[in-house]
Amino acid sequence: MSYWYFRAAWNIGLFTRFGILPSGLVTNTLSFLVMTMRHNRRSTTSVYMSVLAVGDNMVLSLNLITGSFQYIPSFTFLSDPFCKFFVVCYNVTTTFSAYTIVFMTYDKFCAIIFPHRTNELCTKKRVFKFTCLNMATALLLNSPLIFTSETRPNIWCVRYPFVNWYIKLHSALCTIYYPVLPFLVLLFFNFSIIRALYKRKSVVTKQSQRAKAQEKQLTVMLLLVSFMFILLLLPFEIRAIVQYLFTHESTPLYEAKKTFILFATLCPQMLNYAINFYLYLLAGSKFRKDLKALVCCNKVSTSTERATSSSQGTSASTSDVRLSSTETEGQITAISEPRGNQV
């Protein structure tokens, strides 16, 4: 029975390492190229999505390189310096990727909840500041792993090879900062966005209908990325919590089951860094058109660029949100929902 669990874990690992990871690198690169097209760079959400593609590719690259070594027979892993380098880089990139989704969702949250402050809250300058802050915080939080991680025989690379009060404190801080805090914050932002959109009754002019449709597509893409991040991360975190709270006598069968569950929950976690491209294809007709133009080396039509420019202009201008003199006092006519992150 234990052999079956080990064999299943091995096959899941092969699928993850050589199926999900390489394809994710290709699709994230395509997402980055589409989001950095000239007419898309006007949107802060597109900028966040391009940053997310880079962060996801860093995570996938580290896993692909180091994970491939484990399938080489009789391979002895590299020295402690490489172990420390890998542990720090992996934790920094996963944290950075998660909080890129958080900041992207926050950007959209501000655009919908505070439409009059769009010019102030949803700018590319703030995207740059939040991205730098995100990377600096991830580096600062995970830098102590340089001193704690080391290689161990038959285990490969361990973050915390020993336990003391400092290790417990740092482990707790890292766990709270990622993944607990992003999980809770994304739930709050997503439900707040959905609730605000459900309650909002905006009057859309004929001239802004196309811009409104593009903004709606971006909103749906963002929500899909956020919710998929939560959904795919949840099994891995449940496994970690259960393993921490409940102990069991170590037996060959128990270790086999433990390994199988680890790989079975690691697979959707890695899928989280490779699935955004397909979510964009599913939710965004404009993304599909831009991808077709990119792959076929066609120039985006003038009408498309004009519509995108109109979308970004209306979403970035507070003058598009004004009090209607012909309606009841206090009614807001929102010509478009400004588009301000995951994934």
Image: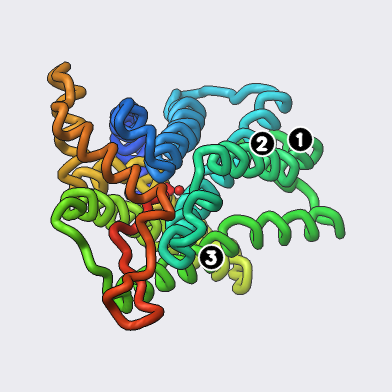
Which mark lies nearer to you, 2 or 3? 3
Amino acid carrying mark 1 in the image: Ile
Q: Is residue 155 visible?
A: no
Q: Are marks 3 and 1 in contact (CB under 8 Å)?
A: no
The quadrant in which residue 281 appears is top left
Between the residue at mark 2 and the residue at mark 3, the CA separation in whole angstroms equals: 24 Å
Q: Is residue 336 visible?
A: yes
10 Å crowding of disc 3: few (<14), some (14-19), many (20+): some
Drawn side of residue 52 relative to residue 325, left or right = right
Front in this rendered view, residue 187 or 45: 45
- Residue 160: x percent and y percent? 73, 47
Q: How is the image coloured?
A: rainbow
Between the residue at mark 3 and the residue at mark 1, the CA separation in whole angstroms equals: 29 Å
Q: Are marks 1 and 2 in contact (CB under 8 Å)?
A: yes
Check disc 2 and report its element: helix, strand or loop.
helix
Drawn side of residue 336 relative to residue 209, left or right = right
Q: Residue furthest right?
A: 165
* Residue at image point 66% right, 30% down: 83
- Which tag, 1 or 2, sits closer to the chain's start? 2
> Which circle marks residue 185 in the picture?
3
Q: Residue furthest top?
A: 297
> Which circle marks residue 146 in the picture?
1
> Which circle marks residue 88 in the picture?
2
Check disc 3 and report its element: helix, strand or loop.
helix
10 Å crowding of disc 2: few (<14), some (14-19), many (20+): many
